[in-house]
Amino acid sequence: MDIKYNLKSASERRTEPFKPEGDVGFGKLRTDHMFLMDYRDGQWCDPRIVPYGPFEMAPGAMSLHYGQSIFEGAKAFMHEDGEIYTFRLNKNAERMNRSADIVCIPNIDESMQVKAINALIDVDRLWFPQQQGACLYIRPFIFATEDRLSVSPSQQYTFCVMLSPSGAYYASGVNNGIRLLISTKYHRAVSGGTGASKAAGNYAASLRAGKAAVEYGASQVLYLDSTNTQIEEAGAMNHFHILKDGTVIIPTFTDTILKSITSQSIMELGDMLGCEVRQETVMLDKFIADIEAGEIIEAGGFGTAAVVSPVSSYIFEDGRILTVGDGKVGPNIQRIYKLFTDLQKGNVAAPQGWVKRVERVAP
Ligand SMILES: Cc1ncc(COP(=O)(O)O)c(C=O)c1O
């Protein structure tokens, strides 16, 4: 499908590269345009790039009532050559369709999703924030638009891609770990539910747990399975821990854990990473005992936003604190973070097909 361009006039849009002086933060800024495509009469149609702005939507739009809405999150980086490169977008497109299946939204051809994102970045390339560690955050999402008040899959949808010029997650390296609340009260997913999707409702449901974590002085919740025996996720990140021989362990992907692209990439790096990475069911009791015995020396979360978020300690609901190692950010986490960000920035050659240049095709 060819994309139509309805762009802002030259006087309304950015004409110089974006060289911000202060911190641009995460997710706050927008670029000049967005990509839109509609689903009606049983097919996706009318792909277009238009000025960024509000949607017109019926109050009865089904996403507003029954939450049929899914999203993705990815990043693009500027390399030394001044060109913009995306990172494993095909994986995001694949996961978007997995989420779509889980909440009964029609799939969008993966290559069309990737084409849409590339076209939008190309149009708004001057918005790339030229600052140490900065990126263009990419937010594709799909929501139900049919004006009908019955609990059934909508017959109409919109696919939108927007971009947010964002600053470095860690302004001066990974220096501090976070604290996680081990919650037996709040759960993000149950088997047979929507936990393996990026459905908007999963994130609404996580807000109350996040608030509880803050009341304990923690940043986020360490989610357990519904029987409170296995470790699942660390807030909106996959959880991992590192054994004293350097082996990285990520809980096995199930239908209650989101298949993180960061985790998958770390598993696929193999020899480049210099340590074994494997998945297994992580039992909470053993995890605690192994930290106390010094068998587990580092832990954290993997995700697009931070790449790696080290955990320095866990807090239980009774106030007890479990410190990981000496509570400082360990050398394995530092090494993983450095390698991963070097791959994204093009300082180290990434595996074939991971990093792709955004071609200049806009009219
Ligand atoms: C619940 C959850 N788990 C894990 C992740 C990490 O996934 P990724 O590495 O693809 O960003 C995310 C973020 O997308 C998430 O929302």
Image (cartoon, rainbow, N blue to C red):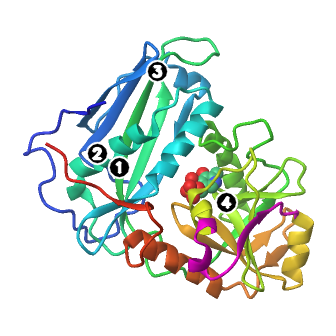
Q: Position of residue 107 (x, y in %)?
A: 51, 30
Q: Secondary structure at mark 1?
A: strand
Left or right: 134, with 251 as reference point: left
- Residue on which disc 4 sits: 238
- Residue on which disc 3 sits: 145
Residue 270 in magenta? yes
- From this view, report whether residue 186 is shown above or below residue 323: above
Which of disc 2 and disc 3 is earlier in sequence? Answer: 2
Q: Position of residue 263 (x, y in %)?
A: 62, 63
Q: Secondary structure at mark 2?
A: helix
| Amino acid type, label 4 | Asn
Residue 72 showing in the rendered view = no
Which of the pair 96/171 is nearer the observer?
96
Distance from Cα at disc 3 to Cα at disc 2: 22 Å
| Amino acid type, label 1 | Leu
Question: Residue at horizontal 45%, vertical 35%?
Answer: 109
* Ligand 1 contact, mark 4 (Cβ < 8 Å): yes
Label 1 Cα neighbours within 10 Å, binned few <14 / some 14-19 / many ≥20 = many
Which of disc 3 and disc 4 is earlier in sequence? Answer: 3
Residue 326 showing in the rendered view = yes
| Amino acid type, label 2 | Leu
| Amino acid type, label 3 | Thr
- CB atoms at circles 1 and 2 under 8 Å apart? yes
Residue extending furthest left?
Answer: 11
Label 4 Cα neighbours within 10 Å, binned few <14 / some 14-19 / many ≥20 = many
- From this view, report whether residue 243 is shown above or below residue 307: below
Residue 125 in magenta? no
- Residue on which disc 1 sits: 163
